[in-house]
Amino acid sequence: MKQNRPKILVIDDDPKIKWLLSEGLSNSFDFIAATSGSEGLQMVGIEKPSLILLDIKMPEMSGIEVLKRLGKVDVRPEVIMLSGHDETRYVVESMKNGAAEFIKKPFDLKEVEIHINSVLEKSNLKREVTILKSELRAKSQYDSFVGDSPKIVQVKNLIEQVANSELTVLIRGESGTGKEIIARMIHNVSDRGDESFTKVNCAAIPRDLLEAELFGYEKGAFTGAHKTKPGRFEVANKGTIFLDEIGDMPLELQSKLLQVLEQQEFVRVGGITNIHVDVRIICATNRNLEDAISQKLFRDDLFYRLNEITVFLPPLRDRVEDVPLLVNHFVEKYNKLYERKMAPLSENVLEKLMSVVWPGNVRQLENLIKQVVVRGDESVAIDLLVGQSSSAPVPTDPAAVTGVTGSAPEAITNEPPSFSLKKLVSETVSREEKALISKVLNRTNWNRRKAAEILEISYRSLLYKIKEYGLNEIK
Ligand SMILES: Nc1ncnc2c1ncn2[C@@H]1O[C@H](COP(=O)(O)OP(=O)(O)OP(=O)(O)O)[C@@H](O)[C@H]1O
Ligand SMILES: [Mg+2]
């Protein structure tokens, strides 16, 4: 029985208090004591008490100060103030800083016992509700990431283990493998699940604006900065920020990000004061960051810091056994969305879908099923697949074994037609961009500075793009 008694820490410069409580209530609780605030704070970490009885007036550090510092402890025990001074300002300060009760000395032992029990009961209830909520959230979240192939089970297990840690997660995998869903899932099942999830696509925001977007700016920091604006990191405070396409972050910004990771602090563009944030960072990329590091386009120290946990999402072709599950999931999804009544697809069609290479991965499969449902005819799947070689050799990229792939834009031409408008646009833009850069470089006799000027991009961006499109070799 003894081990089930709640442990209560008494922090009071008067040692008699602990003695009194132990004498009267030792059948119900285990009392331990500290005679100063600093000693008490140390004991919280070591002893992990269920509740603290805290005096207000102590010579070295006041009870209110102890209460404030306790706010920074990870799992903070409940606190009951026990004080000879019950002036309103003390009571208000205590409650404001999170004390659960206020008892005036001299106290009645029975009264203390009732208060302790009621506070502990409430805190147990609170904890149970939190656990239940996160279990519920976890369940629905894991359900929505469809797949039960061994590779996906591994991914789900890893996420379950790391979601609640504060570790930085890097999600890698080809386009359309589900990196964003996984990022949201990690956030939702973590302790921060009720807070905000802020997504920033580092590739979609022009590089000159990215710093202001992420870290905010002060009024007058640059032309057009008419008023101070907080950045995404500030907005994401207490929650999670998802930095998508992290491989596209310009080098100059990478060092600022590293600083945020290390100190949880940054300065707004044009500002001087440090802003502190409590944000969990999740990143994703389909680039081969190791290559980017060797080309000096990505900082290796940042890579190691981002990479505390790496989730590799395998391409769909390496887990074809998930195809039927995904197909059923998408048929149901679009039946609901478009109020259709498409029946599950036949074995024959499923088999065909399982033999496809799926360069666009799950996104491509989803788009295909969407069209099948909208048109209400499963043979549409086969028609749309015409031209896709079911036995086409998969590009042999050694990194693909671990699910890491570089996305060389040249390889896009070998791909079967994509059904995604977004992908089509990005491919077209890349192709046009490459042609234009190449033209300007040739016209300037490969004078990179001049070419950057004509193209109206920074010199650095140009070097980056030359590498990215492999233009050096063409020279
Ligand atoms: N396992 C899965 N279960 C259900 N839906 C999935 C799964 N994986 C991917 N999807 C769906 O496929 C689409 C693409 O997923 P997502 O946007 O997460 O991919 P991504 O890896 O971030 O791609 P990109 O690198 O192109 O940004 C989304 O509509 C997503 O809902
Ligand atoms: Mg994505």
Image (tube, rainbow, N blue to C red):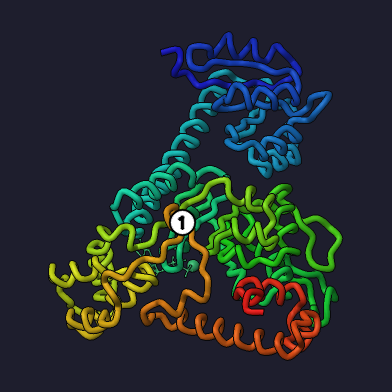
Q: Is residue 248 above or below residue 306?
A: below
| Viewer-side residue, 295 vs 212 | 295
Please give left or right for residue 183 compared with residue 416 in the image: right
Residue 122, image x and y in percent?
A: 48, 36
Q: Is residue 331 visible?
A: yes
Residue 161, image x and y in percent?
A: 45, 42
Q: Is residue 183 visible?
A: no
Q: Is mark 1 within 8 Å of ligand 1?
A: no
Residue name at image x 64 percent, y 10 percent: 19
Residue 278, image x and y in percent?
A: 65, 51
- Residue type at mark 1: give it: Pro
Residue 268, image x and y in percent?
A: 78, 64
Q: Is residue 329 above or below residue 448?
A: above
Q: Quadrant of residue 59?
A: top right
Q: Is residue 340 above or below residue 81?
A: below
| Viewer-side residue, 304 vs 164 | 304
The crowding category of the residue bearing disc 1, from other C-alpha atoms within 10 Å (few below 14, some 14 to 19, many at least 20), is: few
Q: Secondary structure at mark 1?
A: helix
Quadrant for the N terminus, please. top left
Please give left or right for residue 351 compared with residue 384 in the image: left
Please give left or right for residue 305 compared with residue 226 in the image: left
Residue name at image x 73 percent, y 75 percent: 208
Q: Is residue 416 above or below residue 152?
A: below
| Viewer-side residue, 273 vs 395 | 395
Residue name at image x 45 percent, y 68 percent: 175
Q: Which residue is mark 1?
A: 398
Residue name at image x 36 percent, y 66 percent: 394
How many numbered dots are placed on residues in this image?
1
Please give left or right for residue 237 compared with residue 311 in the image: right
Quadrant for the C terminus, please. bottom right
Q: Quadrant of residue 338?
A: bottom left
